[in-house]
Image (spheres, coloured by chain):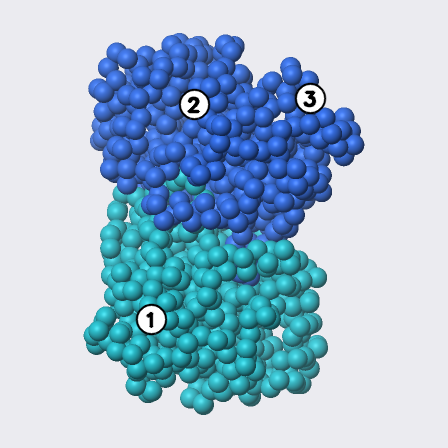
Chain colours: A cyan, B blue
Amino acid sequence: MAAAVVWRRGAAWLRSCRANRELPGVPRARGCAGSREVVPTCERYAVRRLPFARLADGDVAFFERLMPGRVITGEEEVKPFNVDWLKSVRGCSQLVLKPQTTAEVSQILRYCHERNLAVSPQGGNTGLVGGSVPVFDEIILSTALMNQIISFDKVSGILVCQAGCVLERLSEYLEEQGFIMPLDLGAKGSCHIGGNVATNAGGLRLLRYGSLRGTVLGLQVVLADGSALDCLTSLRKDNTGYDLKQLFIGSEGTLGVITAVSILCPQRPKAVNVAFLGCQSFAKVLETFTTCRAMLGEILSAYEFMDEKCMELVETHLKLSSPVADSPFYVLIETSGSNSTHDEEKLHNFLERAMASGLVTDGTVATDEKKIKVLWSLRERITEALTHEGYVYKYDISLPVGKLYDLVTDMRVRLGQSAKNVVGYGHLGDGNLHLNITAESYSHSLLEAIEPFVYEWTARCSGSISAEHGLGFKKRHFIHYSKPHEAVLLMQQFKAMLDPKGILNPYKTLPSAPDRSTC
Amino acid sequence: MAAAVVWRRGAAWLRSCRANRELPGVPRARGCAGSREVVPTCERYAVRRLPFARLADGDVAFFERLMPGRVITGEEEVKPFNVDWLKSVRGCSQLVLKPQTTAEVSQILRYCHERNLAVSPQGGNTGLVGGSVPVFDEIILSTALMNQIISFDKVSGILVCQAGCVLERLSEYLEEQGFIMPLDLGAKGSCHIGGNVATNAGGLRLLRYGSLRGTVLGLQVVLADGSALDCLTSLRKDNTGYDLKQLFIGSEGTLGVITAVSILCPQRPKAVNVAFLGCQSFAKVLETFTTCRAMLGEILSAYEFMDEKCMELVETHLKLSSPVADSPFYVLIETSGSNSTHDEEKLHNFLERAMASGLVTDGTVATDEKKIKVLWSLRERITEALTHEGYVYKYDISLPVGKLYDLVTDMRVRLGQSAKNVVGYGHLGDGNLHLNITAESYSHSLLEAIEPFVYEWTARCSGSISAEHGLGFKKRHFIHYSKPHEAVLLMQQFKAMLDPKGILNPYKTLPSAPDRSTC
């Protein structure tokens, strides 16, 4: 099989990959969306500030003594830390701290706990639910300077590093050693591994390598009162007591600040292939999935889908072009394996079957790294393309895979002309839909047409209202659609136990307890 | 490649597998070891009973009304529930309850919580650290009658079932549907899935399918006060709040009683091969591992090792015979994949390399199910063979893989003639050693020669004193060798929060808080 192959229904022939010639490379980091001024979160959402202490000159002086040159107070310098990447939420913090060690994080939190100062931990600030920026004047604790790799063991494949390491830097480092990170996502050029763990990031490789709950082996965490919890073990198996680190994975910085991570990394596959296919219906997308899962088996490493609207947006806004003929749906299938001949034979057999049975009407295959990146960019850059539309209402839903696209169709009917676009794409292999609705600008009435409809629809199917993005600021009040009352109460008990003053990332993840809010 | 192949160094030729002719089948369930009377745990270990209420006639009457015919009080009928499979610990419970539903478990715990009666949850009672039987007169809550499969979805591969389903029954059910359980272990014929989850069981497939922390998607749990926590979702991804279920995975019944499980099951591999090989040194066992991991890649599903002493014991006590020539070490390699031709070619290439480079001196390969079971029985039945030796001191250690066997060698030197046998085997691919020391009968002086030496040795290598067995009753006081003081304190806070009266599986997992013990 050659490096780039295009298959058409009823016949398969070699052709150079159009995508290869015409599409730009994948950006190393996400750019910032738009340039308009962002409405402060507390205004747009009418949030009331909790009774934390306010920053005083003495506080800043303390931090400057603790970490000279790594305390940011200038309004302009602090500004980018106050706004999320989507430019949808904005805080008004006056202080960013950039510790370099766990000990410094400990001293910062001990001080803030004592002084009752609220803290918003921040990694690469690539979150999509407003979890990584302050809502009011919380001190921003940035992990940007905690970017050291501590160790990597080539026998076990276990990497130990500080929380602020950028995912893509870690990937590059590991690839040189013959390994890869067990997770990959569009924001890899900016996101920090600590933030990935804190939000239990899913991404593009979950189908193959599982979630961070399995691959993260150890964590170092600083609790709200400044005490450090050292569970940074490098063991594949350890059943000595309760697995405390799990509580911090996905807790979005509300229970502790992750300062270092130990993670199990798979071997770098010797062969990677990507097929980009066109399907005439969502039913065919599903049948293609079950067919390829059976035929590709252990080498299947991603099964992504996007609808024709997504393709229109990446074509319009990013000048990418589709390598296959216009189709209502597109599928990206990746294989990763240890033997290129075997893998290509499996993929070839699957594609023959998919074409012969009419599941797929057009497609292209890439086997070299550059062409693979070009195909992946069509899927990975949808988020970026969407930001060019204006305001984006983002939903990240887990559903039984058969019902995945019905939500998009129903939403389109419901919103009619009031939305600019309603698009669906995502990690079909994991049952994870990214439903995005765009409009020229934020509108409360459009939001009310979407919510709680989208959550009620999801709850009726026993789905999750946040598959991988977390609840952050924007979704926290909707947790009841996916979790029973008893579970939420228990979470609040954990929060109260680990952070009795509530200083860690307040207004995030859990619904506010009414008796604690204030003017 | 034929169904059974024997390779010898420098030449490879076909031969029927000796193991196939001479070895008996794998037992469906573990038998009971020995028949001697077991010393009560509280006497052997000088434990003091905590001030729980004692069972009264009124209590038994209550339970008989609640679940008529499923309340066991006769001394002889209760006896097997009081003793562990190893016959190493014994409680003196007078009551076994066999609920059928989560609601019944709820009612039982609500009553016990109110009355301050201690409860020992029990699955298949196959644990190896004394975690599944009472220490004193705790009421035994058996999941034996909670054995219904609730649902299985063939598209997603997600199984939902009650906690008392026997692992092997689930495996058989799934195989008919073209799927397998993501875990497999020697006790499969008796152990319950609820117990597997409560102890975070590892087993033989962890290398390939990861731990239960990744594959368990949802749990239904009853807390100490009888309240039910329904987190029985069937979603691959769900980031709505803290992942509460993780706290119950591996908590050994001390934080709640698991009543139902939702678990992600892999597709049944179309091809399975097992190679059983002889190596002349542990260094060669390690090099064989790195070689096969690189060459077998994604189809490697198990890499187990055992020393020559283990082989002697299965030959002596179980009349099994080795299919390969006498070697200091034996390795069992399993591959599972979707294409038998590809898999056999990969395995063939690996074996050629391993033989040619002198890593392996003798070996046999099996590709059909019956012969594969015969080879697996050599490894799986070591635990059973050991029980025929007399008393067994069992250690389940995680170590950096390069140091794995040094502990066995050092222990042999240390104990000299005072031990009958010191053997090492285990899941090398996971860095997990099962170190077993046998003697005619229990001896406190031998125990003192082993402990804390074994734990100190492990701690020096930053290993874990319990890789997969848990801490149960026997190891709980050694938790500090693998967890820092702050972590243990936090675990005790979780226990106090979730089970303030401490009625759930007391004397297990966590070290006793001195101020709560009593005469």
| Three-letter code for the amino acid on which mark 1 is drawn | Ser
Sequence order check, earlier mark of 2 and 3: 2
State which chain disc 2 sits on: B
Q: What residue is pinned by disc 2?
A: B45
Q: Is residue B500 visible?
A: yes
- Write down the quadrant of residue A74 in the picture: bottom left
Q: Which residue occupies 60% across, 24% down? A: B93
Whole-angstrom CA distance, mark 1 to mark 3, is 61 Å
Q: Nearer the viewer, residue A204 or B495?
A: B495
Q: Are marks 2 and 1 in contact (CB under 8 Å)?
A: no
Q: Chain of mark 3?
A: B
Q: Is residue A400 above or below residue A445?
A: above
Pointer 1: what residue?
A: A142
Mark 3 — residue?
A: B73
Q: Amino acid at mark 2?
A: Tyr
Label 2 CA crowd tier, 10 Å (few <14, some 14–19, many 20+)? few
In the image, which disc is placed on residue B5? none
- Same subunit, labels 2 and 3: the answer reads yes
Please provide percent x and percent y for residue B454: 29, 28
| Residue A138 relative to residue A397: left or right | left
Residue at 53%, 85% in the rendered image: A43
| Nearer to us in this view, A431 or A97 | A97
Q: Is residue A14 depicted above or below B158 in this figure?
A: below
Residue A172 image point, x, y percent:
28, 61
